[in-house]
Image (spheres, rainbow, N blue to C red):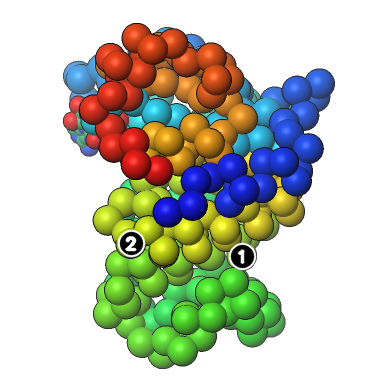
Amino acid sequence: MTVGVSVTGREDRGGPRADEPPLLEVRGIDAGYGGLGVLEDVSFTVPRNSVVALLGPNGAGKTTLLRVISGLLRPTGGHVLFDGEDITAARPHRRARQGLCHIPEGRGVYPSLTVRENLVLHTWKRQERAAVERAVENFPVLGRKLNQRAGELSGGQQQMLSVVRSYLDDPRLVLVDEVSMGLAPVVVDQIYEFLARIIREGASLLLVEQYVNRALAAADRVCVLAKGRIAYDGEPTGIREEIFEHYLGTASATG
Ligand code: ATP
């Protein structure tokens, strides 16, 4: 499997724009489910034009944090700012319209709809043909399956459909949850090449990834979440061995 550096094109895009205000700022977030607290005082930023990897053991709260950022879960404390605007109370569809796109864990496609229907679901009628063409250009295999139900596609093809749908909305920040889960290495490479393309076109990425080495190679910054708190926030090269051993050692590092 190709390691992420060239795949995400970090060297082509000139790196994060640290001199500008961040694209995303998460400030002191507390969140959980019912009475169960999961996230506690979580703060970090995603600079413009950057890839931030969000790592940590199972159950650390990574998916919960992405859900707070995209508006699927209301935090009990703290703020989420997108492009300088406080969006803590904004509904998910409004955030999506602002360019905040969430690719959820476990393939965000509608299995009973066809591939074409999945692609045009949030598209104006007059833009449908362009949306389908754009998707097929990125993943030609989808062009041969347009009239097939999405639920009948292979896992890799469903993931292609899931990620390419995000691209059709011209995203500015893409939240990607375990995009490689259960996929063959060659498909993972294709998905990462696609993510590299949307980054080159100006989007930033917040990446939850089971393959720690792949994530570290791709990322400009890394946040390690452990038991709902930030255990590390900085450059990939600065992670201390103890953080690796305590929080990342159990994850697969075959990136
Ligand atoms: P994984 O890598 O296993 O997906 P994660 O870091 O993404 O882990 P979360 O999925 O955010 O972790 O889960 C954090 C905690 O919240 C876990 O203890 C989990 O059991 C709990 N949790 C997650 N979703 C719910 C839910 N819908 N209702 C109640 N508890 C939940």
Examine the rendering and report whether any part of residue 13 can be seen.
yes
Q: What residue appears at the point 35 percent right and 18 percent down from the top-left corner?
A: 244
Judged from the image, the secondary structure of the residue bearing numbered disc 2 is loop
Q: Eyeballing the image, is 60 above or below 183?
A: above
- Marks 2/1 in contact by CB < 8 Å: the verdict is no
Taking the view exactly as shown, the residue that stands out farthest to the left is: 35
**Amino acid under label 1?**
Leu
Q: Residues within 10 Å of mark 1 (few under 14, many from 20)?
A: some
Quarter holding the N terminus is bottom left
Q: Could you say which is closer to the camera, residue 234 or residue 150? A: 234
Q: Which residue is mark 2?
A: 184
Q: Which residue is mark 1?
A: 168
Q: Nearer the viewer, residue 134 or 196?
A: 196
Q: Position of residue 184 (x, y in %)?
A: 33, 62
Amino acid type at mark 2: Ala
**Dot 2: few (<14), some (14–19), or many (≥20) neighbours within 10 Å?**
few
